[in-house]
Image (cartoon, coloured by chain):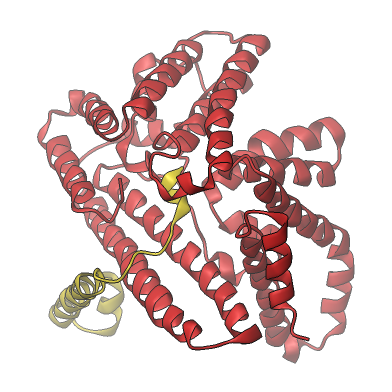
Amino acid sequence: MYGYFLKLFGPRTAGLVTALWYAAILVGIILCSVADPADFRYGRY
Amino acid sequence: MSLLSISWLGWMWLTVGLYWLTPGSIRRYLLGALTLGFLTYYSPLSASLLVAFTAATALLARLRHIGGWTATAAIAAMVAILGYFKLGQALDPDALLDTVAIPLGLSYYTFRCIHVIVERVKGHQPPLPPVDVVTYLLFLPTLVVGPIHRMDDYRRDLARQRFDPRLLSEGAERILYGYAKVVILSNWLTQDVLGGYIDSQTGVWAGYLGIVKGGLNLYLQFSGFSDIAIGFARLLGFRVLENFNWPYFQTNISAFWRCWHISLSQWCRENINDVIVSLTRSPTLAAYATMFVIGMWHEVSFRFFLWGLYHATGIFIWQRTQALGARIDAAIPARYAGVVHAIKVLMTTHFVWLGFKVLEPRNPQEALDMLVGLWPF
């Protein structure tokens, strides 16, 4: 994602936005990990 | 073993850490040993089968010339073992809720073994050192949910392997996106939010949304887990085959199958479709046989037979109407091209989603009730 953000911002801002992007996804995963997992049969092959 | 569990994360990071700390000459042996340790811990039966399959494949792959009958006998034995477990799975539908319904990863490594034997028989690979075959098959990242990665890719990456921070970064990002797809987009957004909304609805609208939810969930889960596997492989310096390429944005069923579970459909295209086309010159027969094998790979049961038949018929109709479709496309003014494209995508996606519905009923009565429930009048 850093490469993408580099097209939009300068190197320092791009680095900061990339870090925020990853942090937001990580927080989202942790917050949503309480949801019931959907049935996924491919995991049983 | 769920890829969402803390223990899987532990195995993943332990493997990556030990792998890069170990001298280059013994890394792949370490990876093989860790894979075997993982499998022995979670599924001893699967570990025994994988060892037997690996030994047979390695012995055959090192021969300068493999006889047709020898290769056929080895492949038939592997398929019979896979079929035995698949049939057991189908006869006991409740076992689907259990992770030990089928030995862990059996469906994937059986097809990888066959791939190696076929590549050798065709002469696409030279006689292979047993260590190459053993370490290719004992490859932890793709063991549980695929993709069915290829021998030539594995050997290419092995030959040029070095610690590459860029690949490491790509791998970590891919794993993060995989977990985001599974946990945020599928489990929370589709399952909880959309599922909750569907529960408050009734009638045909609820039935339709149920189909949409099933299709979205399956894609997000499977492609998410594939992302985790592909990312894990990249952390170890390997680029394995992509498994999905925007399958729900394709304009026909043939294009869908080139973008959905790519490693399986490519395997079947090379080993079933192309062989039958070259022998019979019949793309129709080849499509039906290929979809039959893809159906049976999932489960040896009537419902997966119907599902394979459904998709093969879709491909058959598409094959027969290509010329008509091209004439219609040419007759429609260019300014409506976007609309036509969107209609094709919607039709293909709904065809596929409806196909997943075929898999839900466990008996003909349930299937009939489901169809009646979907009928709007």
Task: Locate residue B316, reporting x and y percent.
Answer: 82, 55
Q: Is residue B256 left or right of residue A45?
A: right
Task: Locate residue B41, reporting x and y percent.
Answer: 24, 32
Residue B334 or A39: which is nearer the viewer? Answer: A39
Measuring 23% from the left and 47% from the top, which residue is drawn there?
Answer: B8
Residue B192 or B180: which is nearer the viewer? Answer: B192
Q: Quadrant of the N terminus of chain B?
A: top left
Q: Name the outermost residue toward the left.
A: B21
Q: Quadrant of the C terminus of chain B?
A: bottom right
Q: Is residue B30 left or right of residue B307?
A: left
Measuring 63% from the left and 22% from the top, which residue is drawn there?
Answer: B122
Q: Is residue B65 left or right of residue B343?
A: left
Above or below, B258 relative to A28: above
**Which hue belongs to chain A?**
yellow
User: Is residue B124 something that shows in the picture?
Assistant: no
Residue B31 figure quarter: top left
The chain whose colour is red is B
Task: Locate residue B123, reporting x and y percent.
Answer: 59, 20
User: Is residue B26 something that shows in the picture?
Assistant: yes
Above or below, B42 relative to B321: above
Measuring 66% from the left and 77% from the top, which residue is drawn there?
Answer: B346
Task: Locate residue B93, reporting x and y percent.
Answer: 53, 47
Measuring 77% from the left and 45% from the top, which residue is drawn there?
Answer: B288
Residue B140 or A36: which is nearer the viewer? Answer: A36
Residue B290 or B296: which is nearer the viewer? Answer: B296
Residue B236 figure quarter: top left
